[in-house]
Amino acid sequence: MTVPKLSELGPDLLVTTRPRRILTLSLPYAGVTLFAAAWLAGWWWSTPLIAFAIFVAVVTATHDVVHRSLGLGRRATEWALFLLGAVLLESGHAYRATHLQHHRTFPSEEDPEGYPANLSALGALVYGPVFLVRLWWWAYRRGSVGQRVWLLAEAALPFAAVGAGVLFSRGLLVYAVMMIVGSWVYPLLTVHLPHRHYGDTPLTQTHTLRGRVVPALFLELTYHLEHHLYPQVPSHHLARLARRLDPVLADAGVKPWKVI
C-alpha cells in the first residue's frame, strides 16, 4: 500500500513559526538553568527528573535541526548541532551523519544507528556505553575536513565537563555523569523498542504510539512511524500528522501501540 504524499496531507505540516523555533531551541537551556537552580537550592532529588526533561528537549530539537525542519540556515544549522549536542555532552554532527544514514538505509548493515534493532532488549541495553562512540567514529571516518573539526571539538566536551567538575564543581560533575550515563539508554529506547520486530515495508519497519500523556511527555517523539514516513515534518506537528494518517494506517492493518 502506498502512503499519501505530504502535499495531500496538508502543507501546514511543514510550517514552523519564529516563536516555535525559538521555543524549541531554548527549551534545552531552560532545562540546564532549572537543573543548576535545583542543585543550588539543595533539591537534589529533582535533578534526575530535570535531566530526563533536558534529554527529551535536546533530542527533539536536534532531531528537527538534522532534518532541516526548523527553517535554520546552513551556518545556523552547524552551530545549532554543536550547541544542542553540548548540552548532553554529545556530538550533534555525528548524530546528523548517522541519523540521515539511518533514514536512507534501514534496515541494512550500512546503518550504524539501526544496529540495536537486531539485538535483544538486554543486548541493546549492554550496547549503550559504546553506542555513541561507534556512531562518532563512523561519522569521523566519512566526514570532510570541516566536519572533522566539529567532531573533534564535540568529542572533547565530556572530558572537559568531567575534568571541570572534578576540579571546580560537584554540581557540574553530577550533571556530566547524568548526561553521559543517561545516553546509554539510547540503543534501547530510541532504536530497539521503536523498530522491534520490524517488517519489510515502510509501514512495518517501525512502530507508533497513541495516547495523551506519554507522547506529550516525550514531545511527540513517540510518533516514530510517522517520522520515518515524513521526516521533513517537525516534531511539533507529528501528533497532527498522526491523526491525518490514522485512516491510512487502519486500512493497511497497522495497529498503533496504545499508551496512556
Image (cartoon, rainbow, N blue to C red):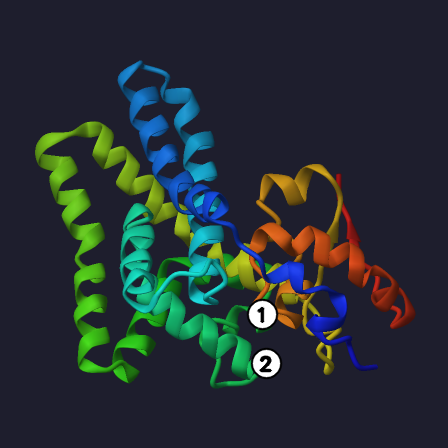
Q: How many marks?
A: 2
Residue 45: where, in percent of width, then height? 42, 21
**What label does residue 117 carry, if any?**
1
Residue 75 vertical placement versus 22 (above, below): below
- Dividing the picture into quadrants, the one containing residue 32 is top left
How many C-alpha atoms fall within 10 Å of the one at disc 2: few (<14), some, or many (≥20)? many
Furthest residue in direction left, as rendered: 167
Q: Residue 69's spot in the image, x, y percent?
A: 50, 62
Q: Which mark is residue 227?
A: none
136 over 59 or under it: above or below: below
The residue nearer to you, when weighing 94 against 114, is 94
Q: Is residue 177 something that shows in the picture?
A: yes
* Tag in front: 2 or 1: 2
Given residues 195 and 66, the one toward you in this image is 66
Of callouts 2 and 1, the N-terminal one: 2
Q: Residue at x 69, y 37 (%)?
A: 213
Kindly check if marks 2 and 1 are in contact, taking CB atoms under 8 A apart as contact.
yes
The residue indicated by pointer 2 is 107
Viewport quadrant of the N terminus: bottom right
Which one is nearer the viewer's eye here, 39 or 250?
A: 250
Asked if 222 appears above or below 230 in the picture, the reply is above
Q: Position of residue 179 (x, y in %)?
A: 34, 44
In space, the residues marked 2 and 1 are separated at their CA atoms by 9 Å
**Local SS, label 1:** helix
Residue 30: % across, % down: 37, 33
Q: Is residue 88 left or right of residue 120?
A: left
**In this view, which residue lies farthest toward the right?**
251
Question: Which residue is outermost to the top?
Answer: 41
